[in-house]
């Protein structure tokens, strides 16, 4: 496979992980930071905006997995790249939101 397929799988993991906090807070009815708030990524958006933003992230992750390369399930390098992308994004989100929410 070419290098950009591996990059796409890593980025898919990033988008899938980023969708989780927005979607979970949104369906829980809570306001949460989003790129559409004022100021962006610091202010909070409505629950509806966060559900939509979470679903957009899930959709982008799915499209990258489904239509770039030939993604194979199971214990393999493809899945490892998605996992690593999700891990990097999750750690980054934990660090960022801990700082922002601390105030």
Image: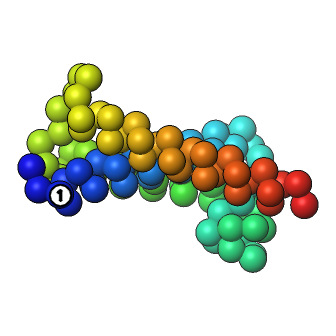
**Furthest-top residue in this view:** 74
Any part of residue 18 in sight = yes
**Furthest-right residue in this view:** 103
The correct choice, above or below, for 98 with respect to 42 in the image is: above
Percent of width and height locating residue 84: 41, 41
Any part of residue 16 in sight = no
The correct choice, above or below, for 40 with respect to 53 in the image is: below
Percent of width and height locating residue 40: 68, 74
Q: How many marks?
A: 1
- Left or right of 50: which side holds 78? left
**Label 1 CA crowd tier, 10 Å (few <14, some 14–19, many 20+):** few
Residue at the spot 50% in from the left edge and 41% down from the top edge: 87
Q: Nearer the viewer, residue 8 or 55?
A: 8
Q: Secondary structure at mark 1?
A: helix
Q: Which residue is mark 1?
A: 3
- Left or right of 69: which side holds 16? right
In the rendered view of the protein, which quadrant contains the C terminus? bottom right
Q: What is the image's colouring?
A: rainbow
- Left or right of 90: which side holds 8? left
- Left or right of 103: which side holds 97? left
Percent of width and height locating residue 14: 45, 51
The correct choice, above or below, for 72 with respect to 22 in the image is: above
Residue at the spot 70% in from the left edge and 51% down from the top edge: 95
Residue at the spot 64% in from the left edge and 71% down from the top edge: 36
Residue at the spot 78% in from the left edge and 68% down from the top edge: 43
């Amino acid at each position: 496979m070419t290098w950009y397929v591996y990059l796409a799988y890593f980025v898919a993991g990033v988008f899938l992980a980023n969708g989780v906090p927005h979607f979970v807070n949104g369906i829980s009815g809570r306001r949460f930071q989003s790129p559409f708030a004022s100021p962006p990524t610091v202010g909070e958006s409505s629950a509806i905006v966060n559900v939509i933003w979470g679903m957009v992230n899930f959709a982008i992750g799915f499209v990258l997995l489904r239509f770039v390369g030939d993604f194979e399930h199971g214990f393999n390098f493809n899945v490892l790249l998605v996992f690593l992308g999700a891990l990097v994004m999750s750690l980054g989100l934990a660090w960022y939101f801990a700082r922002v929410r601390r105030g």
